[in-house]
Image: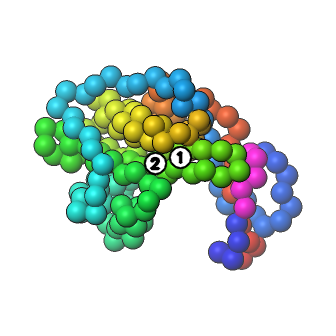
Amino acid sequence: MPWGVLVSAGAQWPHGRKLSGMRLMGMSTRSPRPAPAVEGLVIREATPRDAPDVVHVDAAAFEEPVAIERRWIEPLLCAQSVTVAIAELHGVPVATGYTVSTDGDAGPGLYLAGVAVLPAARRRGVAAAVSTWLLSRDVEQGPRIAHLHPDSDEAARVYARLGFIEVTGFDVYGDNV
């Protein structure tokens, strides 16, 4: 696509066509609500050597082709401002997620994304535990706010329990092609 733009949800934008909408949640990193521990879950920072496991979990959880996810995930594992987590439940990789640290004009911030849990490990608190681990690890670097884009009501409920609040999201517009 030659160009794209995000505008506040519901705003009138006469240029291009609306492609989709994005929900938005945010929180102050000063008041997170940590998730309960999950027995047998070990979370650590992923390295490039963990790429096969991270890609497998991400592709399976989001039902996407491995080849597409590999092109997206592998660069994240080497990016300086990105922290990728890998979570193992009783020694088996079951979840991943990442944060991106920024320090732009609005000040230090943290974007939480890609929290993926294999279907067999869902509804045990794994997603919340991975999110808490990522947020607590990166909050030490100074961001005052964290934000994310939940892709379902279920995900939004998990993040709300951690202290995120849903705010006005975005509409995504692109070139009239």
Q: Residue at x 40, y 67 (%)?
A: 75
Is disc 1 placed on a helix, strand or loop? Answer: strand
Work out whether residue 135 can be spotted: no
Is disc 2 placed on a helix, strand or loop? Answer: strand
Left or right, residue 102 beside residue 69: right
Q: Going from the N terminus, do you reach mark 1 or mark 2 first?
A: 2
Left or right, residue 79 beside residue 53: right
Please provide the residue range marked out in magenta: 5-9
Rendered image quadrant of residue 117: top left
Q: Quadrant of the C terminus?
A: bottom right
Mark 2 Cα shell of 10 Å, populated few (<14), some (14-19), many (≥20): many
Q: Residue tagged by mark 1?
A: 111
**Principal secondary structure, stretch drawn in magenta:** strand
Image height of 90 relative to 11, above or below: above
Looking at numbered disc 1 in the image, what kind of residue is underneath it? Tyr
Task: Mark 1 and mark 2 in contact? Answer it, CB < 8 Å.
Answer: yes
Q: CA distance from mark 1 to mark 2?
A: 5 Å
Across and down, in percent, residue 64 comes to 38, 61
Image height of 67 relative to 53, above or below: below
Across and down, in percent, residue 145 comes to 59, 37
Q: Residue tagged by mark 2?
A: 99
Work out whether residue 176 can be spotted: yes
- 29 magenta-colored: no
Across and down, in percent, residue 112 comes to 49, 44
Q: Residue at x 44, y 54 (%)?
A: 82
Q: Residue at x 36, y 36 (%)?
A: 133
Left or right, residue 32 beside residue 18: left
Rendered image quadrant of residue 174: bottom right
Q: Residue at x 32, y 29 (%)?
A: 125
Depth check: 101 or 72 in front? Answer: 101
